[in-house]
Structure formats: C-alpha cells, structure tokens
Image (cartoon, rainbow, N blue to C red):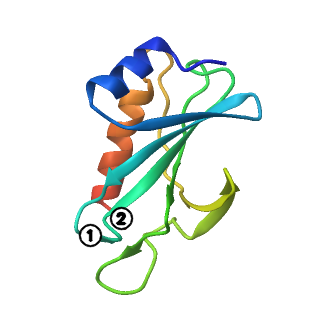
Amino acid sequence: MPLLESDKQYLEEKGLEYQICENSGGLLVVLKGYKLSDLYTPRTVDLLVKIPPLYPNNGLDMFWVYPHVFLVNGNQYPTCANAFEDLLGQKWQRFSRHYQWRPGTDCLASHLMTVQKALLNPN
C-alpha cells in the first residue's frame, strides 16, 4: 500500500523529512526531527502516524513520539500520553487523542494540524 500522492506532496512541500514503513497491511509514517513547543522536554522527537489499510475512508487516530517526552513543569507525562507501544524496534509513547474523521475531507495534512493543536494543549 503506497502513501497517497497528495499526502506525499504535502510532506515534501512542507520540507518534512519522513520515512514510510509497512505495518499490518497499513503504513507507518515517521516524521524525523519533529519540533515541539517549549512545553516539552526533549524539544525534538520523531513523530509517528499509523495509516490504516482502508485510508482515507478509515481515519487516522492518535500519534506516537520517540523519544518519550515529559512536561517541562515537572517530570510528568502529558495527559493521556502514558502508554507505550513497540513499533519499528523502539518503544514509542502514544498520545491518545481522538476526533471525528471526515472521509473525503480529512487527510494526513489535517491530521497533522490536529496533532499540532493537541501538542499545544498537553492537558
């Protein structure tokens, strides 16, 4: 299953370094060197998005980071980000963030905008 051409074009237009790996019939898209706000430590991570087999009809949900991040105001994880999953030979921190997927409207670009908003509000 290849990445949709429109998604690939978006990533390239944004100048994002990315890696695509197959996983259980779907894809894993890893954005390398993803910058976080000063709410987190560390400030740079790899960000992973799972693309399900029936995407874009089936929606994107949640996201994962490596290495694990903590809030800078203490040694605590962001809300709903204290679960971990083995992917690509590493233990990734899962951010459990959900929203209503709109087939035909939403795509990887809109999902990444949702990720960015979620990261600006860690609680």
Q: Which mark is residue 122?
A: 2
Residues tagged 1 and 2 counted as in contact (Cβ below 8 A): yes
Residue in front for this viewpoint, 39 or 79: 39
Residue at the right extreme, as displayed:
24
* Distance of label 1 from label 2 (alpha carbons): 8 Å
In this picture, residue 121 sits left or right of residue 18: left
**Amino acid type of the residue that numbered disc 2 sits on in the rendered structure:** Pro
The quarter of the picture where residue 72 lies is: bottom left
Callout 1 crowding tier (Cα within 10 Å): few <14, some 14–19, many ≥20: some
Q: Examine the rendered structure and indicate whether residue 112 appears above or below residue 70.
A: above
Residue in front for this viewpoint, 32 or 77: 32
Q: Position of residue 49 (x, y in %)?
A: 53, 41
Q: Which mark is residue 39?
A: 1
First along the sequence among labels 1 and 2: 1
The quarter of the picture where residue 36 lies is: bottom left
Q: Position of residue 3 (x, y in %)?
A: 54, 20
Residue in front for this viewpoint, 10 or 122: 10
- At x 67%, y 20%, the residue is 54
Residue at the left extreme, as displayed:
38
**Amino acid type of the residue that numbered disc 1 sits on in the rendered structure:** Leu
